[in-house]
Image (cartoon, rainbow, N blue to C red):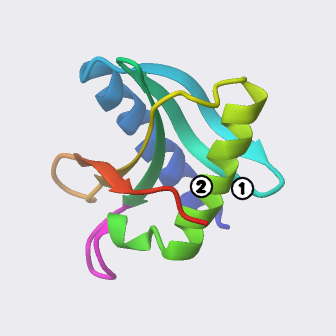
Amino acid sequence: MSEERLALGRQGEELAASHLKQLGMTILDRNYRQKIGEIDIIARDGECLVFVEVKTRKSTRFGAPAEAVTLKKQQQISRTAMVYLSRKQLPDCPIRFDVAAVLLPDQGRPTIELIKNAFETVE
């Protein structure tokens, strides 16, 4: 992946994390990695543990950012979330999978759309 794309992704994740905090969520973990996948942001929203996938784009020319969260990506996030819950010994904790769609146009202000319950646990 190019350095420019990595920088765009990092910027999107920073904006998303700030947005989640503004919504009253507590950030617990960022870029949680396991062999099977990665979760961009893990946050607490009240009693609920929220696994957030951040997708950042400069435009919607090739589709909206959230459209990039494919079934395969959902499966990867779900499996990684189950590992997280097991390692943290939180088997009965209510969970939710959100997508933070970030648009960072070359001109104009960034926009962040938080899609709560974007998908369910996928096997």
Amino acid on which disc 1 is placed: Gly
Residue 34 image point, x, y percent? 79, 47
* Identity of the residue furthest to the front in this view: 92
Q: Residues within 10 Å of mark 2 (few under 14, many from 20)?
A: many
Give the labeled residue for mark 1. 37
Which quarter of the figure is the N terminus placed in?
bottom right
- Is 48 one of the magenta-colored residues? no
Q: Do callouts 1 and 2 mark residues in contact (Cβ within 8 Å)?
A: yes
Q: Is residue 29 left or right of residue 96?
A: right
- Magenta stretch in the rendered image: 57-65
Q: Residue at x 47, y 50 (%)?
A: 53
Q: How many discs appear? A: 2
| Secondary structure at numbered mark 2 | helix
How far from the left and from the top, in percent, is residue 29? 60, 27
Mark 2 residue type: Ile
Judge from the rendering whether residue 10 lies leftward or rightward of residue 89; answer left or right: left
Q: CA distance from mark 1 to mark 2?
A: 7 Å
Checking the image for residue 77, the label placed there is 2
